[in-house]
Image (cartoon, grey):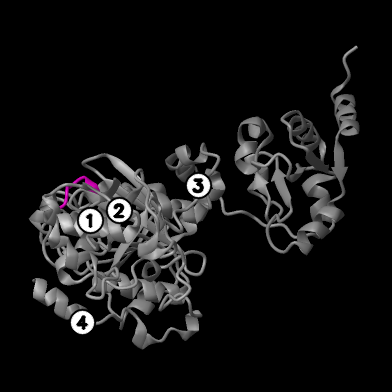
Amino acid sequence: MSPSGAEFIRQIKSQIAQVDPGEVHETLSSSGNGSGPIALIDVRESEEVERGLIPGAKHVPRGHLESRIEGAVPDRSQRVVLYCASGNRSALAAKTLEELGYENVQSMTGGYTLWKDRGYKVEVPKVLTPEQRERYSRHMLVPEIGPEGQQKMLDAKVLLLGAGGLGSPTALYLAAGGIGTIGIVDDDVVDLSNLQRQVIHTTDRIGTPKVDSAEEAMKAINPDVDVVKYETRLDASNIMEIIAGYDVIVDGVDNFPTRYLLNDASVRLKIPVVSASILGFDGQLSVFAPYEGPCYRCLYPVPPPAELAPSCGANGVLGVLPGTMGLLQATEVIKLITGAGEPLIGRLLLYEALGATFTELKVRRDPECAICSREPDEISDEELGVFPDYEAFCAAAG
Amino acid sequence: MATVRIPPVLRPSVGGVKEVAADGDNVGAVLRALTDQHPATQSQIFAEGGELNRYVNVYLNDEDVRVLGGLDTEVGSDDVLVILPAMAGG
């Protein structure tokens, strides 16, 4: 005779390992914030999790366990603790994980209810609205992003330097993807010659400040996004004030002085920069994460002279190229915010459109770097963006 | 012969091509073979003292020669040298 449901669960519980909430609490507390040595998985339904969960837990509903657990816990040898409301569903889930090859799985006895009754800390997660769940539904389905990654994106503040060739596609896709706050710095107005590549702007907005035009386009795609406009040119007097508080900066500026200035200020504030540059049919891309990897000055200690510095004058570029490079930047931004994948830190990606080739080069931290070899508070205001005679070079090149 | 990848800003100095084959046992020799073939590249790659200009990065395959043996780094016939200047276009 088939066992009753209760009997079945009892049998499963005898076959799997269980752990008391007290031990889980102690292990989590001793490892600091976050899951540390334990991957803590909440297998309850979304409606239950919305009312509260254990801090550091990842939500993988039992109904999606088999398809999503690898995204949450890729390493099958990692210790996994599962919990539900009372310890029954998590016991069944533990059995499933063992069958999937997870080697160290435990079900927390008494579940969330007992954890809470013991007075251990819980938190109420920010919840996506039904409209957001629909809008970002394709992100929800990607294990590397999911509701948690989407919430990180909605909480994130990203600053775009330039609403031009690179900034246009980056802004459009970051807005569409639900980056909560997007700052844009640009002091230019939309010009007819921009429209071959700066796809965020339109013919009827020629003459409009680029920050206003970009805001209109982003808001039209996604009213969720808070757009912060800086209709100004970055310089040493305003950069610290503008960039402070942003989580990631996207460098798409068209000149060397601002690139060096940005580097020095971002190192001082320890803000990662997703950097790209373009010329003709060629693009370069890297992520400069201060003190974690090299900075821009480690890669390029000094700028090239005017004859080799095409940014000084008007130069041609294939209209599609900033689209390609700008979207690679947007991808790196989302990776940094969600923690998904391997960001392009310490690597420089070269794209050559005519040959359709990608080349990856290693970039090392320079132990003698003028900026990032020192502590942030040792970098003075006077040093930000300094390099010799650059204004003269640019003036000579026209 | 090693292959030298030419960046866009230097292409006018080498007849517009993206790659040049150049002979030499080490990085310095390969680059000098390049500048011998295309003298217009000389002042763009080398400083007056014969060392690499600081604003020019040279990679042997995927590694910066500054962290290898500099101009003395050995080069094989299948190797690729990448000359890379900073670009600022956006």
Rendered location of residue A252, percent (x, y): 28, 61
Are dots 3 and 4 on a single chain?
yes
Asked whether the beta carbons under mark 1 and mark 2 sit within 8 Å of each other, the answer is: yes
Subunit of mark 3?
A
- Where the C terminus of chain A falls, by quadrant? bottom left
Pick whichever, A262 or A356, lies toward us: A356
Residue B33 has which mark?
1
Above or below for A138 versus A392: above
Tell me the element at label 3. Answer: loop
Rendered location of residue A374, percent (x, y): 48, 80
Rendered location of residue A335, percent (x, y): 47, 51
How far apart are labels 3 and 4 at the CA level?
Answer: 54 Å
Asked whether, in this view, residue A161 is left or right of residue A49, the answer is left
How far apart are labels 1 and 2 at the CA level?
Answer: 7 Å
Residue B24 has which mark?
2
- Local crowd size for mark 4, using a 10 Å CA cut-off: few (<14), some (14–19), many (≥20): few
Above or below for A306 versus A275: below
Are dots 3 and 1 on a single chain?
no
Residue A73 among magenta residues: no
Subunit of mark 1?
B
**Residue at 45% across, 68% down:** A271
Q: Give the residue type that dot 4 points to.
A: Asp
- Local crowd size for mark 2, using a 10 Å CA cut-off: few (<14), some (14–19), many (≥20): some
Pick whichever, A97 or A282, lies toward us: A282
Q: Which residue is mark 3?
A: A129
